[in-house]
Image: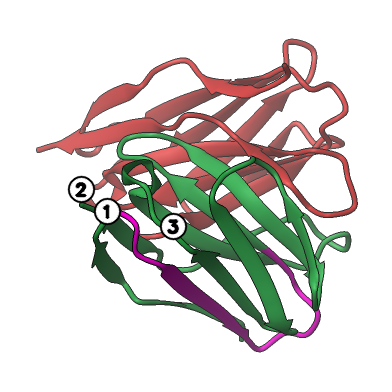
Amino acid sequence: SQTIHQWPATLVQPVGSPLSLECTVEGTSNPNLYWYRQAAGRGLQLLFYSVGIGQISSEVPQNLSASRPQDRQFILSSKKLLLSDSGFYLCAWSLAPLTDTQYFGPGTRLTVL
Amino acid sequence: GESVGLHLPTLSVQEGDNSIINCAYSNSASDYFIWYKQESGKGPQFIIDIRSNMDKRQGQRVTVLLNKTVKHLSLQIAATQPGDSAVYFCAENMGDSWGKLQFGAGTQVVVTP
């Protein structure tokens, strides 16, 4: 069966510090991968998606970036965090275009102080 | 722009009663819809999905109804239990080959004893 991992689970970082969040998927090959951000009490905002190694598409302009160094690894990064980067970051995978169902990881709670 | 939205931000339900969560969509090109359940501090969990060639689909204690005429989607939960307390999101596919989904704002379901 497929599983998706995210770490760290919780992170507190000062403004201006760098960021690296990692997501890995097990049990499937060549998945589509997605990064979302969820503000408190809000819906999901798609940040990045990837259909293959090294292929990243950005949905919104921001100081975040994403990379996919391996087939089942997706990384969200920032060189300098802003207060507005605080939120709940979710990684998801799918086998699109076979199916559009996305399956989510447990998330990373990021607080920027 | 086109979006998916929910009618009720909060739904209070007595334990044992049936819950109905509603969702409106405006993208007539969407042909796939999903309901997710998100418990506090966790990633969204897939509940049930439906394709546009269907009007109704049933799972364990859950039923999704799709009314394409009025672009309305609903999730019915039978015999609501305390463990059903969560935020419920509807999502529609964007009709592209990357499996992108458009999420609604979410409905908080609170089950009272």
Foreground label between 2 and 1: 1
Q: Position of residue B29 (x, y in %)?
A: 88, 28
What is the crowding at mark 3: few (fewer than 14 residues within 10 Å), some, or many (at least 20)?
Answer: many
Q: Give the SS element for disc 3.
A: strand
Decide which of tag 1 and tag 3 comes sooner along the chain. 3
Foreground label between 1 and 3: 1
Q: Which of the 4 image quarters holds residue A19? A: bottom left
Name the residue at 80% across, 78% down.
Answer: A53
Chain containing the residue with disc 3: A
Exactly how many numbered labels are in the figure? 3
Q: Which chain is red?
A: B
Asked if residue B87 lies left or right of residue A48, the reply is left
Q: Which residues are magenta?
A: A15-33
**Front in this rendered view, residue A28 or B54:** A28
**Front in this rendered view, residue B89 or A76:** A76
Quadrant in the picture for the N terminus of chain A: bottom right
Read off the residue under disc 2: B82
Read off the residue under disc 1: A112
Q: Which chain is green?
A: A
Q: Which of the 4 image quarters holds residue B69? A: top right
Establish if B14 lies above or below B22: below
Residue type highlighted by circle 2: Pro
Establish if B77 lies above or below B4: below
What is the crowding at mark 1: few (fewer than 14 residues within 10 Å), some, or many (at least 20)?
Answer: some
Q: Give the SS element for disc 2.
A: helix
Name the residue at 66% across, 89% down.
Answer: A27
